[in-house]
Image (cartoon, rainbow, N blue to C red):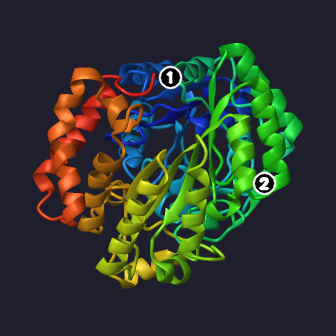
Amino acid sequence: MTDCLLAYPIPTEDSPTKGVALSIFYLGAELEKNGLDVEYFDERFDKFKDFVLLLEAGVFAIGVSSMTGFQLIGSKKMLEYAKKINPNIHTIFGGVHPSLLPEQCIKEPFVDFVVVGEGEKTMLELIQTLKNKGDLSKVDGIVWKKDGEIITNKPREFMDPSEWPFPMTGKSKKYFRIAAERGELMFQASRGCPFNCNFCYNQIFNKRTWRPMPVDKFETELKIFVDEFHIENIYINDDNIGSRKDRIQKISDILRNFGLKWTTSIRCPSIDEKTARMLEKSGCRELLLGVESGSDRVLKEVVNKMHPHGVEDTRECARVLSGTTIQSRYNFIAGLPSETIHEMHQSMDLADWIWKTDKNAKITFDAYSPYPGSELYNEAVKAGFKEPHDLDGWSKMTLSNEVNPVAGNLYYISGLRFRGKKGDSTDRNFPGLKRLIILPFEISAHLRWRLRFFGYYGWEKAIVKKLFAWASRTGSGRK
């Protein structure tokens, strides 16, 4: 019998990206290292019939990882199916969403345990305790049910970064190979973020902490990927790599020595001329930058972005990066609580300015999704957000959610307006003659953006969503 099946549902309905599901592979590596028999299932690559066959062959416990949003649909399906095949299986729910709402998730009849926060040690102790019929009250970091009563155990302390397992094992290697061949291999150099943006999941999940991996460990583990897959690209999947400039320098030196092109996330105020040149020289090809808003009021009073000079920090960042070859993705959030139409237009004006200033810029507008437990969540409720009370409701809270219809429309319109350059997402998703399929909607998006007109977009958006979902299923996208 398999000790644990770790499953990763399709994360988004209409995105063809297929990066590594690190949330299950870090856990699985820890379990395997301690002698447990683990199987993996990634719904993006594996057929559901294989999931069923694994369950029918015998599984002691199943762990499913999920973010808030669309991924919850697959999570519910998998957990329910596991219980249907074997009512005695131990169902474990983890990841960002269950960690934010453990008491709500544990009420679902198909969930036996919720793992809260960082899960490697918790998952290991939980399965060992279940197998040995031990005392579950001594397993830190879980919420569980006993005789109908919900029990919340003591929170688990964070792991020492030097003890993080290397996520790839013999059993999970095939998934890393897929990502490597597509140029989408991901690897972590740190976890968390020390800043306190009011909308962010890090307030709860990582308790506003930043934990860097030892640099020598980073280099040793990265070399394994280089030697195994002969990769040319790597995505350093950190929430914020730039908390210490001396560390950025060391990480950059390692990546340059390996000859890799790389991508990561950093804050606008962390970018100055010296840092930008150092990143460019090291092979950094893309930076993800959380701009959020073009309004100083929204940045300070709503987001708590902690930019010393507000919007001007974003402008200075764009000016600096415009003199480099780095492609920078400037991420905005539309539909924030108390944001006015005028302030949304300020964000759009800033986006237009960035687009003209930085020839390598990419622009995205995500619709605000209220993450429970964050500071901004209560403001969203006051502004009329109706909190879902089950997984079905939360599954609608995506980056293009309908909490604010204008912001939800803007997600697609801005994407079609700004992400159609050669090699960018629309070009990758609809290569060659396939581009003609999406072209009419690109033209419409350009016109709507220029006129600041986002109403009556329902039928267009429905078709665009289906086209991107089709691109995902048919394997278009980055190769």
Residue visible at 67% across and 23% down in the picture: 37
Kindly indicate whether the residue at mark 2 contacts the one at mark 1 (C-beta within 8 angstroms).
no
Q: Position of residue 107 (x, y in %)?
A: 45, 60
For the residue carrying disc 1, how many other residues have a C-alpha within 10 Å: few (<14), some (14-19), or many (20+)? some
Q: Pointer 1: what residue?
A: 182
For the residue carrying disc 2, how many other residues have a C-alpha within 10 Å: few (<14), some (14-19), or many (20+)? some
Residue visible at 68% across and 34% down in the picture: 283
Q: Give residue 352's quadrant in the image.
A: bottom left
Q: Position of residue 288 (x, y in %)?
A: 56, 50
Q: Which secondary structure lies at badge 2?
A: strand
152, above or below 242, in the image:
below
Q: Pointer 2: what residue?
A: 211
Q: Which secondary structure lies at badge 1?
A: loop
Distance of label 1 from label 2 (alpha carbons): 29 Å
27, above or below 207, in the image:
above
- The reply to whether residue 369 is visible in this rendering is no
* Quarter of the picture holding the C terminus: top left
Q: Position of residue 392 (x, y in %)?
A: 32, 55
Residue visible at 83% across and 49% down in the picture: 247
Instruction: Identify the amino acid type marked 1.
Output: Arg
Q: Who is closer to the viewer here, 260 or 42?
A: 260
Mark found first going from the N terminus, 1 or 2: 1
Q: Position of residue 267 (x, y in %)?
A: 63, 60
Q: Who is closer to the viewer here, 59 or 244?
A: 244
Drawn side of residue 417 relative to residue 114, left or right = left
- The reply to whether residue 364 is visible in this rendering is yes
Q: Give residue 469's quadrant in the image.
A: top left
Residue visible at 70% across and 58% down in the picture: 272
Instruction: Identify the amino acid type marked 2.
Output: Arg
* Quarter of the picture holding the N terminus: top right
